[in-house]
Image (spheres, grey):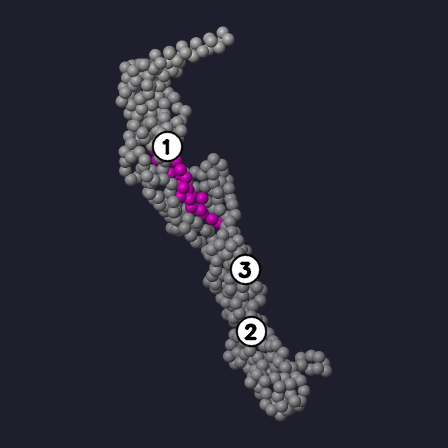
């Protein structure tokens, strides 16, 4: 019981003591301004009568940071608070009172005007375009959000109040600056090859933000090209494109990641004649998963290779890659074959005309063959001239029965490469 009474008496005495100390004169005319030599600190000044002072930061609708500074009596009434002591994107006041670390606060608080610590506006809508051996990167910055403390003592005047530090990251390395800070909205990098990530470290007097990202990607491509194709019948070239991009965090080395987006351009190249330059034969783009399936018109026998061209799309720059060449052998295509009039049943003694039309429209000699039922073999009937891809033979159906014919078309040379020959389907004729 005695102990409780003693504690209560001590509390009452302490309260009386604080009330008496708080009657000391309060500082006056508390002001904030930027410290000299840049905007790295906030300069606080005030007026008092050579008493010790305590300085704190108070949040206005923001949490107050744990910052306290005691100024001994007799020291100048000024103090610089580093900007790092202020949380970003808040509203604050500086409070000054008479007091010491041992005796506590002994006067009322006097506060400065309210000011904000709004950070820079993050760049957006970055674009990249090839320029010489390098790239030109441009970016835009959205309109700054509303200032809820207009004309506060620490507002920085002028349109270009933030600066941009261009940074490059590569796999296994940290993001690093590649040039001085600038107020421009573009950056020319004279020589750079993917993979890389470009980012802007945007700074103002209060904080730093990262934005304006551009990805420099490398690509790999595989392809499946048919080994044979009928002349002038499109082939399907299929495969997959994989992009390799860089991902970076501020405090760790950058890493490489795989991506398989749709919309990546793909070009099929061919050599029309041996030793000629590679020229486009068809174009397409990847679908979901990085896959592509491109119809390619065919001519003579020739090699094909598939490439991802250097291309830009918004904030992405994709480097080129090419598959290994694959050779497609062309085969003569039978456009039509049969009997004139389309009739496959004839009377004995009537005239019959058998024909064949092929692509390419070549001049050669073809062989008409008939099926021998006794020997079960094809037997040459007659060699026929083919002109501009057409050959025909008229004959009389001399005896009744069922007969089977076909044309054998030889191979040819086209653009310095061979085209394989072919045979028509079986042409059946019934004579009654």
Identify the residue at image location x=52%, y=70%. Answer: 232
- Observer-side mark, 3 or 2, equals 3
Identify the residue at image location x=53%, y=62%. Answer: 237
- Residue 357, given in percent of the width and then of the height, sits at 54, 79
Left or right of residue 85: residue 368: right
Q: Report which residue position mark 3 lands on.
A: 238
In the figure, 158 relative to 283: above or below?
A: above
Q: Is residue 181 magenta?
A: no
**What kind of secondary structure does the magenta stretch mostly adopt?**
strand
- Observer-side mark, 2 or 1, equals 1
Judge whether residue 17 can be spotted in this image: yes
- Magenta highlight range: 197-219
**Quarter of the figure with residue 344:** bottom right
Near mark 3 (Cα within 10 A), the count class, few <14, some 14-19 or many ≥20, is some
User: Between residues 16 and 47, which one lies in front from this camera angle?
Assistant: 16
User: Between residues 118 and 363, which one lies in front from this camera angle?
Assistant: 118
Q: Secondary structure at mark 1?
A: loop
Near mark 1 (Cα within 10 A), the count class, few <14, some 14-19 or many ≥20, is some
Q: Report which residue position mark 1 lands on.
A: 90
User: Between residues 7 and 424, which one lies in front from this camera angle?
Assistant: 7
Q: Report which residue position mark 2 lands on.
A: 333
Left or right of residue 351: residue 105: left
- Residue 277, given in percent of the width and then of the height, sits at 47, 62
Left or right of residue 69: residue 408: right
Q: Residue furthest top?
A: 2
């Amino acid at each position: 019981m005695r102990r409780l009474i003693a504690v209560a008496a001590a509390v009452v005495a302490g309260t009386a003591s604080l009330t008496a100390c708080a009657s000391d004169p309060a500082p006056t005319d508390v002001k904030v301004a930027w410290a000299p030599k840049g905007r790295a600190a906030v300069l606080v000044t005030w007026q008092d009568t050579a008493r010790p002072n305590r300085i704190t930061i108070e949040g206005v609708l923001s949490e107050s940071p744990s910052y306290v500074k005691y100024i001994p009596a007799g020291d100048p009434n000024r103090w610089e608070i580093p900007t790092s002591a202020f949380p970003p994107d808040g509203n604050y006041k500086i409070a000054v009172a008479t007091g010491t670390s041992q005796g506590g606060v002994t006067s009322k608080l006097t506060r400065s005007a309210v000011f904000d610590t709004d950070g820079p506006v993050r760049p957006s809508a970055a674009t990249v375009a090839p320029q010489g051996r390098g790239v030109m990167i441009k970016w835009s910055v959205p309109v700054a959000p509303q200032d809820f403390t207009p004309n506060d003592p620490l507002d920085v005047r002028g349109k270009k109040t933030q600066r941009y530090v261009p940074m490059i990251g590569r796999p296994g390395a940290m993001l690093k600056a590649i040039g001085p800070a600038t107020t421009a909205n573009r950056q020319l990098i004279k020589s750079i090859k993917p993979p890389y990530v470009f980012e802007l470290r945007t700074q103002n007097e209060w904080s730093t933000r990262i934005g304006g990202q551009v990805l420099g990607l490398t690509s790999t491509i595989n392809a499946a090209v048919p080994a044979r194709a009928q002349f002038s019948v499109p082939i399907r070239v299929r495969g997959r494109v994989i992009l390799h991009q860089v991902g970076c965090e501020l405090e760790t080395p950058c890493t490489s990641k795989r991506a398989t987006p749709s919309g990546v351009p793909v070009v099929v190249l061919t050599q029309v004649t041996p030793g000629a330059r590679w020229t486009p034969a068809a174009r397409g783009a990847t679908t979901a998963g990085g896959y592509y399936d491109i119809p390619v018109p065919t001519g003579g026998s020739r090699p094909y290779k598939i490439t991802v061209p250097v291309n830009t799309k918004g904030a992405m720059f994709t480097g080129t890659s090419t598959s290994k060449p694959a050779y497609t052998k062309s085969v003569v295509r039978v456009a039509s074959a049969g009997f004139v009039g389309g009739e496959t049943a004839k009377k004995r003694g009537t005239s019959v005309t058998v024909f064949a039309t092929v692509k390419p429209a070549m001049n050669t000699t073809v062989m008409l063959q008939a099926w021998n039922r006794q020997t079960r073999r094809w037997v040459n009937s007659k060699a026929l001239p083919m002109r501009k891809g057409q050959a025909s033979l008229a004959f009389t159906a001399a005896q009744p029965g069922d007969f089977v014919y076909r044309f054998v078309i030889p191979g040819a040379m086209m653009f310095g490469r061979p085209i394989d020959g072919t045979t028509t389907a079986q042409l059946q004729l019934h004579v009654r």
